[in-house]
Image (cartoon, helix red, strand yellow):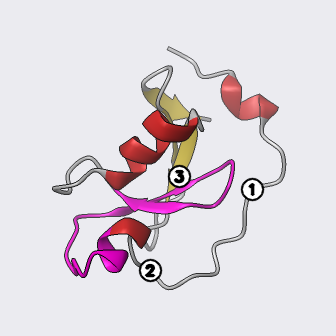
């Protein structure tokens, strides 16, 4: 499947906050698997391999359907609606 939503994106948000899941950090949780950034608003949450899956929760709450990995050396994007890598 091909994601066409990525073509509708405006400028990508700039990631400027420390490398933490915003919800986990606020709750005093210091461990997660990987971090993802919402390409609509810049929210940073933990991935589906993490216990709380805050990046997916952000999608469910807001409908912001595209995110990208902010792990060092990774630059891929994911579409929650199409369930595919967005290129």
Q: Secondary structure at mark 3?
A: strand
Image check: 6 left or right of 76?
A: right
Few, some or many C-alpha atoms within 10 Å of disc 2 (few <14, some 14-19, many ≥20)? some
Q: CA distance from mark 2 to mark 3?
A: 14 Å
* First of labels 1, 2 by sequence position: 1
**Residue pointed to by mark 2:** 19
Above/below status of 40 relative to 80: below
Tell me if label 2 and label 3 are in contact, CB under 8 Å: no
Q: CA distance from mark 1 to mark 2?
A: 17 Å
Tell me if label 1 and label 2 are in contact, CB under 8 Å: no
Tell me if label 3 and label 1 are in contact, CB under 8 Å: yes
Q: Specify the segment rendered in magenta.
A: 24-46
In terms of depth relative to the viewer, which is nearer, 61 or 18? 61
In terms of depth relative to the viewer, which is nearer, 82 or 76? 82
Numbered badge on residue 12: 1
Q: Determine the residue located farthest toward the left in the rendered image.
A: 51
Above/below status of 46 relative to 82: below
* Residue 53 highlighted magenta (yes or no): no
Image check: 45 left or right of 68?
A: left
Q: Residue at x 49, y 20 (%)?
A: 82
Which image quadrant: the C terminus?
A: top right
């Amino acid at each position: 499947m091909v994601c066409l939503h990525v073509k509708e994106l405006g400028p990508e948000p700039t990631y400027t906050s420390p490398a933490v899941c915003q919800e986990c950090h606020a709750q005093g949780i210091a461990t997660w698997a990987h971090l993802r950034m919402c390409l609509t608003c810049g929210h940073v949450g933990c991935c589906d391999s993490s216990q709380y899956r805050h990046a997916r929760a952000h999608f469910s709450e807001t409908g912001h359907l595209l995110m990208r990995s902010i792990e060092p050396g990774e630059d891929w994007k994911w579409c929650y609606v199409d369930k595919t890598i967005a290129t």
